[in-house]
Image: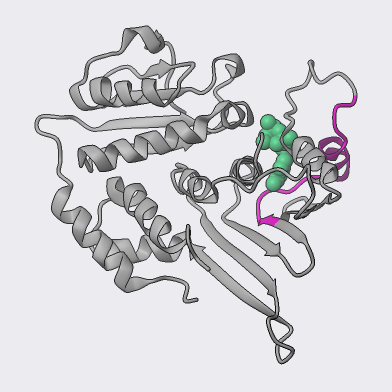
Amino acid sequence: MPKLKIEDLEKISDEFKRTMTVREGGGKVKVTVHMGTCGIAAGAREIMNTFVQQIEEKNVKDVILTTSGCAGLCSREPMATVEVLGQAPVKYVDLNSEKAKKIFEEHVLKGVLVKDYALSIGSERIQ
Amino acid sequence: MNDISLHILDIAENSINASAKNIEILVEENFKDDLFTLEIKDDGKGMNKSMLEEVTDPFITTRTTRKVGLGIPLLKQAAEMANGKLEIISETGKGTKIYTSFQMSHFDRQPTGNIMDTILALLASEKEYNLKFCHTRKYASPSEKISCVVKEFTFESKIFKEHLKTLGIENGMLLPIARRYLKENYNNFN
Ligand SMILES: Nc1ncnc2c1ncn2[C@@H]1O[C@H](COP(=O)(O)OP(=O)(O)O)[C@@H](O)[C@H]1O
Ligand SMILES: [Mg+2]
């Protein structure tokens, strides 16, 4: 098998280029999923996957999705941090797919904080 | 950690945290010899002798005072439960190689899990590094002329990302595109 199926990749890229857009009036948003051992054991990968699927479903290409290491709050994993450019980062805790979906729809896409799932506001910065 | 794909993610995250620039993940399902092996290599900062002893020796001493995780001992335990083993070779400044084996058909072998999701999570890391991934399946030969049948899927993040760049793809589209690509090319490679 070749290292890369180029034709396939080009076909997929074309399709995504056609469908994906920049959100109207939206500022840059960065979503970080914490991928330490505790996070992984608690389901952080599924949260990551949910966000990837949301990006695909909602066709937005200006959301930056990354992972970082342990956030030091093992009992509240899985965790994710949402940072809208120019605003304080918000840490969400005890996540599952449903909550991640809601956070994506409300906070990431509309800029509306999901208070029920948030840990604290402005108390930390993403390293 | 209840499947092998999650262990892979956890061990590779260690490599990322060790500032590795190159990480290689080799998965081999050898149906011919009833063996499942996993090898994760990195060129990160490595570990010295005493550190090595500590990370492989599970559940000893009180770990409450030090912040030492359980990722490697958990994988070791999973391997040993399935009639396998875990070995680490590491050198300060050079890198680390973790080799794990399982008896594939063993009742207590953890399921393989979703390796595609693990690759995606590794691609999402904010650190810059090259990920090489290779998944091999070896089957007993249906005829005497050949010793075994080998199927292989390979993926390299650097090549993948470079190609997307030449196609004019922005960063924000990387993960959904990679997800689709892996779904189509990896999930049912046979
Ligand atoms: N690939 C590696 N390269 C260098 N050091 C490593 C590597 N893997 C593990 N270590 C060291 O072993 C420690 C324990 O690893 P682990 O059991 O996964 O727990 P954790 O990642 O939560 O610290 C790490 O903190 C690190 O110091
Ligand atoms: Mg670890």
Can the viewer see residue A98? yes
* Count of marks placed on residues: 0
Image: B63 above or below A52: above
Residue drawn where x is 54% and y is 15% of the image = A76
From the viewer's side, name the closer residue of B61 and A123. Answer: B61
Residue A71, image x, y percentages: 54, 23
Residue B28, image x, y percentages: 68, 63
Which image quadrant for residue B1? top right
Q: Quadrant of ligand 2?
A: top right
**In the image, farthest residue toward the left:** A24
Q: Which residues are magenta?
A: B39-60
Image: B159 above or below A61: below
State left or right for residue B30 relative to residue A76: right
Is residue A72 on the magenta stretch?
no
State left or right for residue B134 relative to residue A23: right
Residue A80, image x, y percentages: 43, 24
Residue drawn where x is 54% and y is 33% of the image = A35
**In the image, farthest residue toward the bottom:** B145
Is residue B55 on the magenta stretch?
yes
From the viewer's side, name the closer residue of B107 and B26. Answer: B107
Residue drawn where x is 61% and y is 59% of the image = B24
Image: A16 above or below A104: below
Residue B168, image x, y percentages: 22, 61
State left or right for residue A25 relative to residue A83: left
Residue drawn where x is 27% and y is 13% of the image = A113
